[in-house]
Image (cartoon, helix red, strand yellow):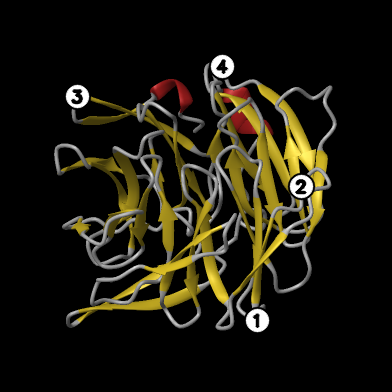
Amino acid sequence: MLKSLAKRFTLRRSNLALALLAVVATASSATSTIERSTPIAFITGAPIVVIPESDSSLIFVDVRDGRTIRRTGLTGRITDLIPCSNGRRIVAVTESAITEIAPDPSIPPRQLRSIAAGEKASISRSCDEIAIFGPQRTTIEIGGRDGVKPASIPAPMGVSQACFGKNGKDLIALSTSGAVSILNATTAAARKLENLPTTDVLGIGCLGDDSIITASVPSHVWKTMSSTAQKLNGVVCDMAGHTCAESIHGTLLATVRDESGSISDQLFIYSRQKKEKFAGQRLPARPIGIAMNEEGTLILVAFKDRAPMLWRFSNGTITKDAAFDLH
């Protein structure tokens, strides 16, 4: 059913070689490599996936029949894709701009704002709030959409990563010093997250149940108002690196990293409710990106040298969707 899509949409080596950064995480005596990968996403409320077709263009695909719904070119290399929780649209972040795009090709893309060199952006789940930060910036700018004057929060050490909490008002920031702080966008009040894991925190992510997850070996999870962390034994979830994804409430996590933090050739699902890890069949190639739908039943895996594959999760079992096998 999807053979024609395979001919039209092949993930070539030159198009999706988007390994952005390699850093090293040390856990006890083990050393792990955490490297950045390719952003892909499911559209909220629709059976549509969004995948970079090249460094600066996107393809919207209906997962039911493989139909290409839309192709969109952007300015600059794509660094993040954020599905908006309150509508069928997505926000694409590139090195130079933030753009809102709907699957409907009759609706033109809308640029929300530009990004200067060296800056990074985080978008709230509703896509109503934008945070601009950077390792060399001494402030975090929040707002700046629809003519709203942005608020400025001091960040003297610079910020390497940030994400919005579920309410869209709390911004969780990872400073260049390794400290994690919870910032209120309205009051500019800041609270440092205590009891970080003893291993290096290489990234952070914000889950759908208003929790914070660290990209560490292993990952740890906090509720935003709690100082007690849940250790996810055997799980490394790097959401900012696009190798870990969540269901809508963060109860299920999908990752392609093994216990050491290295990208593996296997897909893993972790249930936070059951505290149980499930493993799927071996992947046919090294993955470079992953996305999960709201219900946690569909997982899309992208590869460097071949078209993406769709996997299904049900009753603790991970199986390949044969209809989406593009080879």
Q: Are marks 3 and 2 in contact (CB under 8 Å)?
A: no
Identify the mark at residue 315; answer none if there is no mark.
3
**Sequence-wise first label, 3 or 2:** 2
Q: Nearer the viewer, mark 4 or mark 3?
A: 3
Q: Nearer the viewer, mark 4 or mark 1?
A: 1
Query: Spatial distance from mark 2 to mark 4, Cα to Cα?
Result: 35 Å
Q: Secondary structure at mark 3?
A: loop
Query: Spatial distance from mark 3 to mark 2, Cα to Cα?
Result: 42 Å
Residue 288, position as x, y percentages in the image: 48, 54
How packed is label 4: few (under 14 Cα within 10 Å), some, or many (20 or more)? few
For badge 4, the amino acid type reads Asp
Q: Nearer the viewer, mark 2 or mark 1?
A: 2
Instruction: List the residue tagged with mark 2.
Output: 145
Query: Spatial distance from mark 4 to mark 1, Cα to Cα?
Result: 45 Å
For badge 2, the amino acid type reads Arg
Instruction: List the residue tagged with mark 1.
Output: 136
For badge 1, the amino acid type reads Gln
Instruction: List the residue tagged with mark 4.
Output: 65
- Name which residue lies at 41% across and 45% down: 245
For badge 3, the amino acid type reads Asn
